[in-house]
Each structure stands twice: as C-alpha cells, then as structure tokens.
Amino acid sequence: MLQYTNLLSLLTHITNLISIFILTYGILLSFIKLIQSELARFTHREKIAVRQQIRAYLGSYILLSLEFLIAADIIGTIQHPSWEEILLLVGIVIIRTFIAFFLEKEMKSTSTE
C-alpha cells in the first residue's frame, strides 16, 4: 500500500510540474511574440490585433495548464480520499472551471473581433 501511495504522490508532483512547464513555456513564447510585434513596424490598429492574438495564444496555454492542475488535484484526492479532501477538490475544480470557462469565452470573443 505504501508503494501505491508513493506512486500517486510522485504522479501528483509530476503532473503539477508539467502544468508549471506548460504555463512557463506559454508565457515565454507569448513574451517573445509580444517583443517581436512591438519591434515590427505595424500601425496602431495592427498592433492591437496582434496583441489580441497573443492574448488568445497565452490563454490557450493557461487553459491547458489549468487542466493539468485539475488532474493533479484528482490524483491527490485519490491518494487521500477523505470527505474534507473531496470537498476541497470540488471547490478547486469549480473555481478552476469557472476561470477556464470565462477565459475561453474571452478568447472566443477576441478572436471574432
């Protein structure tokens, strides 16, 4: 049973690290794209459009990172299946789902503009 718990703990940490890596990677790529767009000779209107594309690009990485965080929380709850942990998981999943929903909604609205 101890090996099972250790495996779940390791899997939770790995999933959290993957989430951090995805988010960091998305931030770095978005920052590079932002610098490139600022150095390019775009009109003001073109720069605004490019910034909206960069926001959508970064938003997709944030959403993917949130999905991995939710998966890590689920794995952690499997490891410690108490009512307190389950209620905490439900709260975290609800909050992260709302964040993901509104972020995705904003991304869709900026892509149609």
Image (cartoon, rainbow, N blue to C red):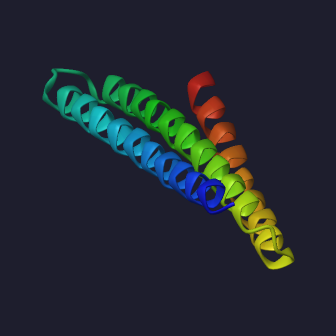
Asked whether 17 or 48 is in front, the reply is 17
Lateral position of residue 49 relative to residue 109, left or right? left
Residue 76 image position (x, y, % from top left)? 66, 60
Q: Residue furthest right?
A: 83
Asked whether 82 or 103 is in front, the reply is 82
Q: Which residue is rendered at x = 27% and y = 29% of the image? A: 33
Decide: is 74 above or below 53.
below
Query: Quadrant of the rendered structure where residue 23 is?
Result: top left
Q: Which residue is rendered at x = 13% and y = 28% of the image? A: 39
Q: Which residue is rendered at x = 57% and y = 32% of the image? A: 110
Query: Quadrant of the rendered structure where residue 63 is?
Result: top right
Lateral position of residue 55 relative to residue 109, left or right? left
Lateral position of residue 24 relative to residue 5, left or right? left
Q: Which residue is rendered at x = 63% and y = 60% of the image? A: 5
Lateral position of residue 31 relative to residue 50, left or right? left
Residue 101 image position (x, y, % from top left)? 72, 45
* The C terminus lies in quadrant: top right
Residue 93 image position (x, y, % from top left)? 74, 57
Query: Quadrant of the rendered structure where residue 40 is?
Result: top left
* The N terminus lies in quadrant: bottom right
Asked whether 46 or 4 is in front, the reply is 4
